[in-house]
Amino acid sequence: MHALNAEQAGKIAAALTYSTGFGNEHTTEAVPGALPEGRNSPQRAPLGLYAEQLSGSAFTEPRAHNRRSWLYRIRPSAAHPPFRRIDNGTLRGGPFTETVPDPNRLRWDPLPEPAPGTDWLAGLWTLGGNGDPAQRCGMAVHLYHANAPMERVFSDADGELLIVPEQGGLLLRTELGLLAVRPGEIALIPRGVRFRVELLAATARGYVCENHGAPFQLPDLGPIGANGLANARDFRAPVAAYEDVAGPVEVVNKYCGNLWSATYGHSPLDVVAWHGNHTPYVYDLHRFNVIGTISYDHPDPSIFTVLTAPSDTAGLAGVDFVVFAPRWLVGEDTFRPPYFHRNVMSEYMGLIEGAYDAKTAGKGGFVPGGGSLHNMMSAHGPDRETFDKASAAELKPQRIDDGLAFMFETRWPVLTTSQAAEAEHLQQGYDDIWQGLERHFRP
Ligand SMILES: O=C(O)Cc1cc(O)ccc1O
Ligand SMILES: [Fe+2]
């Protein structure tokens, strides 16, 4: 297996085609006639392929939540040698017990430069998380910084991976086909789907939300109506593309928090045709239909939810993915930036580009590639500079278009790993941004 360099990967990425629609029943074949007609598992699948079902939900889950795809492949996935444990590197899995839960507000600078030859998998660095992959509950926050294409193939039995690039695009070669994802877009790899990451630039940096619970879905729109927020038609799934090559190919599997590896005699990215709704996808965050107030007050950021992964309590997400996209602010007699608050939910925020309207930009601040963690009930909100400016600002219509920030918001506290709690790039003195908010009370 020879992974491509950035220029070669870029050419492939530029020519990709997709099948559109969130949760659709896609059908696709890389070779005409590879997809059986009218049944999933004929006595002999077409073209000598093996039929295989990949389930992302229990067989018996309600139809609206049922996820599965049928894959028609050169060899069945079952034909593989034993997996053996390998070192986890800087990847960690729940339950997160390395540190004592910390009520403090935390903020990190971007990850340091990786050593030469760091592929996307080796570049993953776990900040923290909650729940337990063995209970299929909770989530983990990872960051990555990579400078080499993957030669190996990876799959995550522990959950789906929501990838948020911040620097450098990625070419994702998955079992179901190829996807390109660039900063400003997101990609999702479903639980268990095998994939390889090649880089569209010399280095790649970004964030990953690993969701152990029920898969991300589009949020209900309620009174918003039939359209808005992230529109289903803007999600793109791959079309079938396969590798018919002999091994050895290393396949790494994340299983209940640990990495396991097996060397296959062939590429497992050998699916010639597939149909179903358990698919990877990409979405361009610039397509997000931002809704906000046209009268007064600052709406809660749930209005910016792109995807939500429900837990077993209605309205209480295992994790929400929320984006702060370019928009107009027109609220009258309104403190327009995010308000001061304490939230029962836990908020990890990252910045894809530019600045965020509640925080001062620049070195030592909230910067692209960095991140902040405001855990359950921790008091936070605008820093002093933002508060002073916004309290005095003339309230004419204002366009916010100098940044793209996001939040992974989860119902459970995010417990940090030791490497995150002790990192050199953990900012010291973060609390100081709220110093100097003086008493203005005039009884
Ligand atoms: O803390 C943050 O910056 C995220 C956030 C944004 C907002 O507009 C309202 C509440 C909130 O938690
Ligand atoms: Fe917040």
Image (cartoon, grey):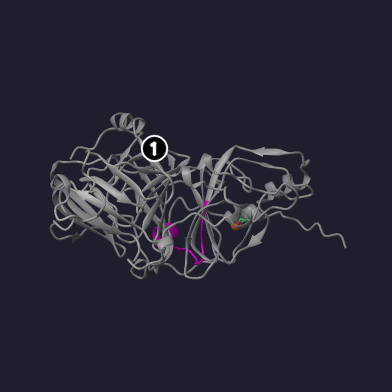
At horizontal 45% and vertical 60% (from top left) the residue drawn is 421
The boundaries of the magenta stretch are 407-422
Query: In which quadrant will I find the C terminus?
Result: bottom right
User: Residue furthest toward the front?
Assistant: 38
Q: Residue at x 69, y 52 (%)?
A: 298
**Which of 433 and 406 lies nearest the eye of the viewer?**
406
**Identity of the residue drawn at 59% across and 42% down:** 361
Residue 175 appears in the rendering: no
Across and down, in percent, residue 74 comes to: 16, 47
Residue that carries the numbered disc 1 in the rendered image? 169
Residue 36 appears in the rendering: yes
Left or right: residue 103 versus residue 78 is right
Mark 1: C-beta under 8 Å from nearest atom of ligand 1: no
Residue 158 in which image quadrant:
bottom left
What x and y, as percent, mark residue 101?
A: 48, 69
Which quadrant does the N terminus fall into? top left
Q: Choose between 279 and 406: the one closer to the eye.
A: 279
* Image region (quadrant) for ligand 2: bottom right
